[in-house]
Amino acid sequence: MIRRYFIKPFRNWFKNKIEILIKEIDSKDKENRDLPFTVFYPNSKNSLSYIIPKEKENLIMCEQGLPVPPEKLWIEYGSNIQGYLYSGKMQIEIMIKLLEKSGLEFVKCKRILELGCSSGRMIRWLKPFADKMEIWGTDISSEHIYWANNYLNPPLNFATTTTIPHLPFEDNYFDVIYAGSVFTHIDDLFDSWFLELKRILTDNGRVYVTIHDRYSIELIENRPEWKESLLADLLKNNNTFKNNRENFGKFVGLRGPDSQVFYDREFFEKSIKNKFEIISYTPEAYGYQTGVVLKKRNQN
């Protein structure tokens, strides 16, 4: 009897407390609800509970025999399935070509990491190598990683990580680390992230990243396909950029994971010179972004 009288009021109190909390959350707009420097994006972040279905959906398969994610997980890459798949395939082909040109024998690599893999737009095209390589993708979006783990694993491996510069891998683990349109969104933790990539890269390995540089700005402002974009509007209307256009080393528009980061190449090189040697720059390797191939700098 005592237990019943104790539990019932507690349940009512807990229920009322949760209802008040939900109302408080719903009463705030998204900008106030989300911290601008998000550590990671939780799955179903506005729910107090969720499930991951055990059964898989019947999805369209790509030519690699892997399922294509629903459009809500495309993060605006491609207006249709063909465009979504082609963009990832093309960018993987460009990356491998640039890595081979740098002197790396890609087929001899043992472990590969994609930083910021989303739902597998690029990494899926590495499936032909998965029988001989350990291939990982990480992302700060739990929803995307849940999908990738459910539908693309095996043969590929995935893990949710955070914006904190740490990855759950041993030192000198990967032969290749690549990040397409990731360092275009990393603002203040740029240095620490490159230190972390150096830690987990093998001595003869390669890092491939894409960045916004001054050439990217020219493309965004002048190419018909990009000059009406939201990024073009940011450059056009941001007073910080307009007032420092000629003398910025690094320009950050917006903040947190949604930031848009631009570099002057001289500043970029200076920022990483104690960590990496730049092997090559390739303009338009990733749309208007410049592809950069790096290797560990010899500390001796």
Image (cartoon, rainbow, N blue to C red):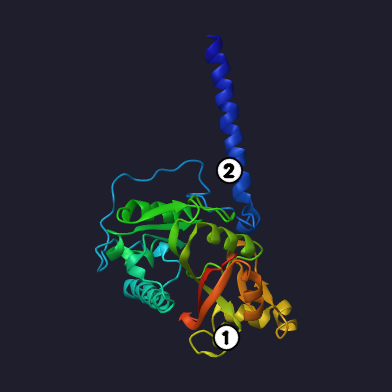
Dot 2: few (<14), some (14–19), or many (≥20) neighbours within 10 Å?
some
Q: Is residue 163 visible?
A: yes
Image point 34% across, 66% down: which residue? Answer: 108
How far across and how far down the image is residue 263, in percent? 63, 77
Closer to us: 175 or 214: 175
How far across and how far down the image is residue 245, in percent? 70, 84
Closer to us: 259 or 106: 106
- Secondary structure state at the residue bearing disc 2: helix
How far across and how far down the image is residue 39, in percent? 59, 53
Q: Quadrant of the C terminus?
A: bottom right
Of all residues, the one furthest to the front in this rendering is: 300
Q: Quadrant of residue 217?
A: bottom right
Query: Would residue 265 be found to the left or right of residue 43 on screen?
Result: right
Mark 2 residue type: Ile
Residue wearing tag 2:
22
Q: Nearer the viewer, mark 2 or mark 1?
A: 1
Mark 1 residue type: Tyr
- Secondary structure state at the residue bearing disc 1: helix
Image point 62% across, 72% down: which residue? Answer: 261
Image point 65% across, 65% down: which residue? Answer: 255
For marks 2 and 1, the one nearer the N-term is 2
Of all residues, the one furthest to the top in this rendering is: 1
Query: Would residue 141 be found to the left or right of residue 60 on screen?
Result: right
Asked if 226 appears above or below 132 in the picture, the reply is below
Badge number at residue 215: 1
Q: Is residue 118 visible?
A: no
Asked if 284 appears above or below 147 in the picture, the reply is below
Closer to us: 226 or 157: 157
